[in-house]
Amino acid sequence: MTTLFQKPVQATGAGKIVGAGVLGFATLAMLGLVWWSLSPILGQIYAGIRLAETATLWRFTGWGRYFTGMPAGQPFAFVSIYKSSVGFGLGATLVTALLGFLAWRKRSREHIEVLITAPAAGFAQRDILGAFVPAGRLVRTPVTEAEVADPSALPAANPFTALRDLRDTRAVETVADSVPWYLAAALFLTIDAAAPLKDRKGRDALLKAARTAADRLAADPGVVLPADLLSTLRGYMLVAITDQAGRDIDVLNQVHAEFGGEDDLKDVITELAALALSRRALFFPDYAWLRHVDPNLQSRITSYA
């Protein structure tokens, strides 16, 4: 039984096409009627547009002479605007096709989706590094596939967990040489930020030494740093850990407690950076040199908040 309320029947694909065709022809008919009625005015406007498009060269063509030579107020032939537009239409079509071809060609060769498309065997670590990592800057290319590409991503064993009292300078000296130089420098900076040393000249001297070492490695990743430079950096770290003169002992005890809670020395540095940040004493530019040595650690320090 037919109900009073029925769902409207949706237009079929053919119906939509017929509707669009009717609308298109109606539009053309309206434009044709406007041209037939107002061609004396529209023709002059049309001629001005064509002259401007071609830097007045259009006037030397047949249709150009026709439009520019027509006396004012006289109607133009109905088909004149359509025939005179054929050349421009073909030219625009060719230019559009050329631009489309160039865009397609660039997309098919240079788009990022094409550049990063994995080969059949997949990407090996060496392939990724060779394609996207600047040689000798932040990451060193491995010798073998089994070798870790970025040594800075490896954990650094914390040698201080074996010590009972970090105020014992002689005890700390026994493990100081096992700390990589850049970690020694980062330790000094984070400790000094959390529990400042009385002598403020040490910070500037250490920063200068750390930046010198980092710049040498950036210029030549295989360079062997002078032993006295490394010894200087570890010496400043030793002072930052053990010196008690003129310092807040409670905060220094907090610093020492961080050493005993982490097995990875980089985690210790990160926690010390958080402690310094909580005291509003962490100065991020002090760690810019780390980007040449251990960008991962630099990122952990500067984005810890």
Image: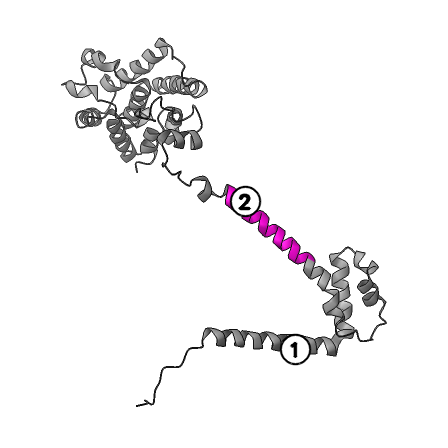
Viewport quadrant of the C terminus: top left
Q: Is residue 169 left or right of residue 8?
A: left
Range of residues picked out in magenta: 91-109
Q: Residues within 10 Å of mark 2 (few under 14, many from 20)?
A: few
| Of 151 and 225, the residue lying toward us | 151
Q: Which residue in the protein does label 2 denote? A: 106
Q: Position of residue 171 (x, y in %)?
A: 18, 13
Q: What element does badge 2 sit on?
A: helix
Q: Position of residue 244 (x, y in %)?
A: 22, 18
> What's under tag 1, amino acid-wise?
Ala
Does the magenta run of residues contain 185?
A: no
| Of 232 and 21, the residue lying toward us | 21
Residue at the image position 64 percent from the left and 74 percent from the top: 28
| Of 20 and 160, the residue lying toward us | 20
Residue at the image position 46 percent from the left and 42 percent from the top: 114
Q: Which residue in the protein does label 1 denote? A: 29
CA distance separating discs 2 and 1: 41 Å
Res 191 quadrant in image: top left
Does the magenta run of residues contain 99?
A: yes
Does residue 244 appear anywhere in the picture? Answer: no
Q: Earlier in the sequence, mark 2 or mark 1?
A: 1
Q: Is residue 126 left or right of residue 34?
A: left
